[in-house]
Amino acid sequence: MGIYFLSDTHLSPNQPVVYDKFLRYLRSIRKDADELYILGDLFDYWIGDDGSALLGHNPAIEALAELSDGGVQVSVMHGNRDFLIGPEFITEIGGTLIPDPTTIELNGQTVLLMHGDSLCTDDVEHQRYREVVLSPEWQESILEQPISERLNRALDMRAASEKNKQVKSQSLMDVNQQSVLQTMKQYGVRILIHGHTHRPQVHHFEIDGCEATRYVLGDWGRNNDAVIVVNSEGTINLHHAEI
């Protein structure tokens, strides 16, 4: 039995290959998983729980619900794309919405879970974006709009984001190591798991003379689908999603 972590699947009907791989992966872990943590950007964009059918996401909802019905604890964290996921969706899948950040216990160690974009503090523009879209007042104003208007806004924001990424340096869009150290010290942890940067890797460093590790999950759109599986012995393994 194991604990699974993934992020940045960016599910969209426009990416049927990725969508199908995600569904097949969920089926493949059904018998072995005790818990599944989705650390943000499950969807490429989310316009509110009442828009899930319009976006064609019933297959994902049904697959996650099947996992929950089978006894797997499914925990979902908001990302910078699907921050409007709400209680109706969580109820439908039988899961739990967890805050960013969240701490859990793994094999006697406290582990910090994050989406990861809050650590990209060099990207001042993105931090300003976060401040706006995570505001309860802004989200309420968006959800009051008709679904069609929300969809158009989401598509516009997605296009603007892709355009901005073309002119930003890769280092600017990566985490700031000082922010990583500060956050891990704040929560008193030596292990951090996050996504967002689409740069799957295991980073080893020190915090106050003690060994520390940062695990970065992959994105699923460029054969970068790195996931983490923690086995029954408590070993943390980062590898490609195996189906």
Image: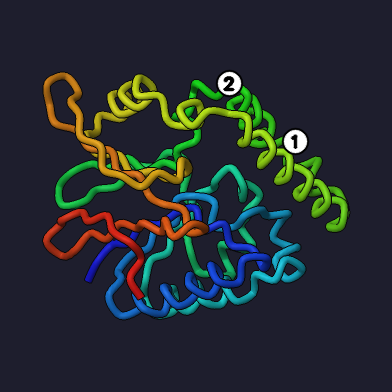
Q: Nearer the viewer, mark 2 or mark 1?
A: 2
Q: State which quadrant residue 29 falls in.
A: bottom left
Q: Earlier in the sequence, mark 2 or mark 1?
A: 2
Eyeballing the image, is 88 above or below 32? above
- Where residue 16 appears, as percent x and y from the top left, is 60, 71
The crowd level at tag 2 (other Cα within 10 Å; few <14, some 14-19, many 20+) is few
Figure quadrant of the N terminus: bottom left
Distance in Å between CA atoms under marks 2 and 1: 19 Å
Seen at 15% across and 52% down, the residue is 107
Query: What kind of residue is marked 1?
Result: Trp
Eyeballing the image, is 205 above or below 122? below
- Where residue 32 appears, as percent x and y from the top left, is 27, 75
The crowd level at tag 1 (other Cα within 10 Å; few <14, some 14-19, many 20+) is few
- Where residue 201 appears, as percent x and y from the top left, is 30, 44
Q: Nearer the viewer, residue 53 or 107?
A: 53
Tell me the element at label 2.
Answer: helix
- Where residue 115 appears, as percent x and y from the top left, is 46, 43
> What residue would you read off at disc 1?
138
> What residue would you read off at disc 2?
124
Figure quadrant of the C terminus: bottom left
Seen at 50% across and 21% down, the residue is 122
